[in-house]
Image: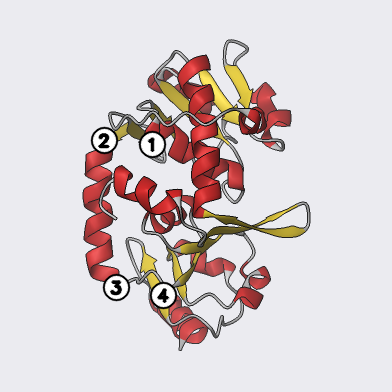
Amino acid sequence: MKTINDFISFSKSSDKTALIFKKEHKWIRKTFSELLSDIFKMNRMIQTEIKDDNILIFSHPYKYDFFVTAFSVILSGKNLVIIDSFKDKIKLKSMIESAKIKTVICDDTTKYFGFIFPKTIKKINAKKCYSNQPLEVIKNSGKIITFTSGTTGNPKLIERDIEFLFKQIEMIKNNINLTNSELVYALLPMYALMSLFLGNTTIINRDPGKIRKFKPTALITSIKSIKAIKNPINSVEHAFIGGAILYKKEAKMLLFLFQ
């Protein structure tokens, strides 16, 4: 798939499992058609209730709501804002101000931590969108806004348009040889979004030990995230690892996990 329209056409009538995730101690499977329906339901809420351009996701990155929200904001033509950490209130305030955020979409868990935001921020629970009628209005004009780590000062805003992201996805796809038959375990949310966009069944969970029973055939993660994997996942045939530097001890860890 090369465009949003390709993803939508594929998903509309597909009973292929898109996401495998855990909810209230139970494993749930959602097909691509179910995922797309929920995306369009949230799209109605975003198009009708949110007037500002930049929308921040404050949702657990290993939960279904995160992926529905991310795709919905992208399809709505608004700008998706992703913040990696909400712990430092000073940096959080700086990022909110620089991105001119007025609306935050939470999930059932994160809504209880809404106090970390200024009182002027509008907080919407993603759960309310699932009772909506789907709205199939697609706009490709949005951007994804992320931030630098801020280790040398305040985090700096980075904007990427959708076209740029598609080019990145196409470049990655041409180099990782990931087929649609793979069962992908993605340890980072953006990699999981890419895996879904490419039409792969994707498992999301923070604990690698809990996903072994599904026998994933491919792993996509960062070098940093492999530290969360303590024991080999013997079913993995392809491991795609990204990161700036691969140290000798990390290379040994990769050999242990995936030889």
Q: Amino acid at mark 4?
A: Ala
Measured Cα–Cα span from mark 4 to mark 2 = 28 Å
Q: Is residue 256 above or below residue 213?
A: below
Measured Cα–Cα span from mark 1 to mark 2 = 11 Å
- Residue 164 position, x and y percent, is 22, 43
Measured Cα–Cα span from mark 3 to mark 4 = 11 Å
Secondary structure at numbered mark 4: strand
Residue identifier under label 2: 161
Q: Earlier in the sequence, mark 3 or mark 1?
A: 1
Identify the residue at horizontal 69%, vertical 30% (top origin).
111
Residue identifier under label 3: 177
- Closer to the camera, 69 or 191? 69
Q: Nearer the viewer, mark 3 or mark 1?
A: 3
Asked whether the viewer can see residue 80, the reply is yes
Q: Amino acid at mark 1?
A: Thr
Is 211 on the left or on the right of 90, as rendered?
right
- Residue 115 position, x and y percent, is 68, 22
Q: Is residue 124 above or below residue 13?
A: above
**How many labels, in total?**
4
Q: Earlier in the sequence, mark 1 or mark 4?
A: 1
Residue identifier under label 1: 146
Q: Is residue 252 above or below residue 13?
A: below
The disc label shown at residue 239, or none: 4
Please identify the quadrant where the C terminus is shown: bottom left
Measured Cα–Cα span from mark 3 to mark 2 = 25 Å
- Closer to the camera, 60 or 126? 126
Classed neighbour count for the residue bearing mark 3: other residues with Cα under 10 Å, few (<14), some (14–19), many (≥20): few
